[in-house]
Image (tube, rainbow, N blue to C red):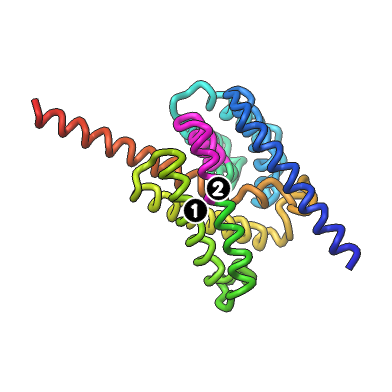
Amino acid sequence: MKAKLSGESSRYITAAVLIGVIAALLLWNNPIVIWAVIGAVFILGFREALALYDLEQHAGFYALALALWATSYFVANPIESALVACMILASITAYAQRLSPRAMLPFLYPTLPFLALYSVYKDFGVSHIVWLILIIALCDIGAYFGGRLFGKTPLSPTSPKKTLEGVIIGVAVSIVVGSVAGIFVLGTHFFFAIFASLIVAVCGVFGDLYESYLKRQAQVKDSGSILPGHGGILDRFDAVLFGAVGMHFLLIFFNDFACSRCMSLLNLMQ
């Protein structure tokens, strides 16, 4: 009982510290600092991913990861940095025949989602990062308490403790509160705010599920131990990472769609 209480207290303390650090970082809103902090978290998550994929902690992997993150600050589309890294690894694998194709897995996850997270900030600003975190947090909280109160149906064999009822409640909470925040705080379109909140919340659910799958395959409880009471970086950021991919895609897609429709309308008016 004492050990359980100690574990719970460390979990709450870590959560409070994380919230404080993230809040301070977002309020400061310094582009170089945010890029550097996300990059540091990415490298820690990348290290955990190498272990989950049962890959050697080779210095070359870290050198390539650091190089692609460095270039992400300067390129218009940071996600392309990961694609170049995968191409380099594929070329080395084919030429030297010393690497397994599995070596590309950490450059797909968590690298691409971390770049998507940075891209949300770079392309749309700190307000959309706050919106992303809000949607994911609401879904997580709603699913936890909803599952405890009404959960009966397991969501997936990958994560038997999560229930379908809990996930539905969590997604519903995210849609209601997330869409209100999107409409009245960010000024987004009514239907887009609802749709984006839904998609990001669902992406977050599957991000958490994918991380659980990797841990089951690796036969470990947590991806790491750097966050007391929470486990590793990927344990804490799994839902945010998948949510970032969904949010960045939606924002880019609908921005481009809206721009193309406006241009078509202008052309018709001329």
For numbered disc 2, what is the local secondary structure? helix
Asked whether the residues under the numbered discs 1 and 2 touch, taking CB atoms below 8 Å apart as contact, a structural biologist would say yes
Q: Which mark is residue 112?
A: none
Q: Residue furthest right?
A: 2
As for residue 79 lying within the magenta part, the answer is: no
Residue type for callout 1: Val
Q: Nearer the viewer, mark 1 or mark 2?
A: 1
Q: Residue furthest front?
A: 184
Where is residue 137 drawn, in percent x and y? 59, 52
Q: Identify residue for label 2.
A: 134
Residue 178 visible from this viewpoint: yes
Residue 153 or 61: which is nearer the viewer?
A: 153
Q: Does label 1 or label 2 sit earlier along the sequence?
A: 2
Q: CA distance from mark 1 to mark 2?
A: 9 Å
Where is residue 263 drawn, in percent x and y? 20, 30
The answer to whether 237 is drawn above or below residue 219 in the figure is above
Q: Which mark is residue 177?
A: 1
The answer to whether 203 is drawn above or below residue 117 in the figure is below
Where is residue 153 drawn, in percent x and y? 55, 77
As for residue 123 lying within the magenta part, the answer is: yes
Quadrant where the C terminus sits is top left
User: Which stretch did the figure color magenta?
Assistant: 111-135
Q: Identify the residue at image location x=60%, y=22%.
A: 32
